[in-house]
């Protein structure tokens, strides 16, 4: 069985990693949101087979930043 926590990340091991499930439970966000942040490059992470691994320091830094409160801005629609 593969130990996903020992997955190689750019030639180095990622000692402090969380799976998306662990991170979503800890930070009360969805796993899809975390995957999207990694795909956008906002969070440092890696896919190991079917499991996404997130660098814990990257995750802590992201959630330490203040976020704007209130409703999301409406998308601008093109009108013909």
Image: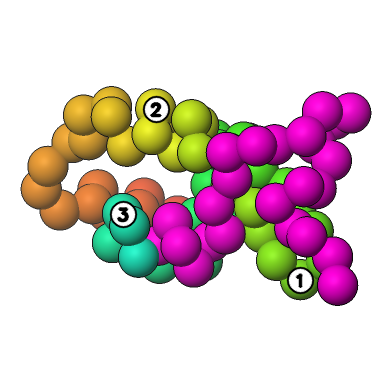
Q: Residue at x 22, y 35 (%)?
A: 67
Task: Name the secondary structure under disc 1.
Answer: loop
- Answer left or right for 67 relative to 44: left
Which mark, by number, is residue 63? Answer: none
How many labels were placed on the picture? 3
Q: CA distance from mark 1 to mark 3?
A: 21 Å
Q: Few, some or many C-alpha atoms within 10 Å of disc 1 (few <14, some 14-19, many ≥20)?
A: few
Q: x and y percent of residue 71 in the render?
A: 15, 53
- Residue 68 at x, y = what percent? 18, 36
Front residue of 43/68: it is 43
Disc on the earlier residue, 2 or 1: 1
Q: Horizontal placement of 61 versus 13: left or right? A: left
The reply to whether residue 63 is visible in this rendering is yes
Q: Residue 15, image x and y in percent?
A: 65, 37
- Residue drawn at 31 percent across, 54 percent down: 27
Question: Of marks 2 and 3, which one's residue comes earlier in the chain?
Answer: 3
Residue in view at x 70 percent, y 66 percent: 51
> Mark 2 sits on what residue?
61
Whether the magenta-drawn stretch holds residue 9 is answered as yes
Q: Quadrant of residue 62?
A: top left
What residue lies at 70% left-to-right and 36% top-to-bottom? 14
Helix, strand or loop at disc 2? helix
Disc 2/disc 1 C-alpha distance (Å): 25 Å
Q: Position of residue 59 (x, y in %)?
A: 45, 38
* Magenta span: 1-24
Q: Residues within 10 Å of mark 2 (few under 14, many from 20)?
A: few
- Asked whether 63 or 79 is in front, the reply is 63
- Separation (CA) of disc 2 from disc 3: 12 Å
Residue 27 - label: 3
Residue that mark 1 sits on: 50
């Amino acid at each position: 069985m593969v130990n996903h926590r020992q997955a190689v990340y750019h030639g180095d091991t990622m000692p402090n990693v969380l799976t998306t499930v662990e991170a979503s439970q800890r930070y009360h966000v969805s796993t899809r949101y975390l995957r999207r942040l990694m795909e956008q490059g906002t969070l440092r992470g890696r896919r190991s087979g079917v499991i996404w691994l997130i660098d814990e320091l990257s995750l802590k830094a992201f959630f330490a930043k203040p976020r704007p409160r209130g409703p999301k801005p409406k998308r601008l629609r093109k009108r013909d």
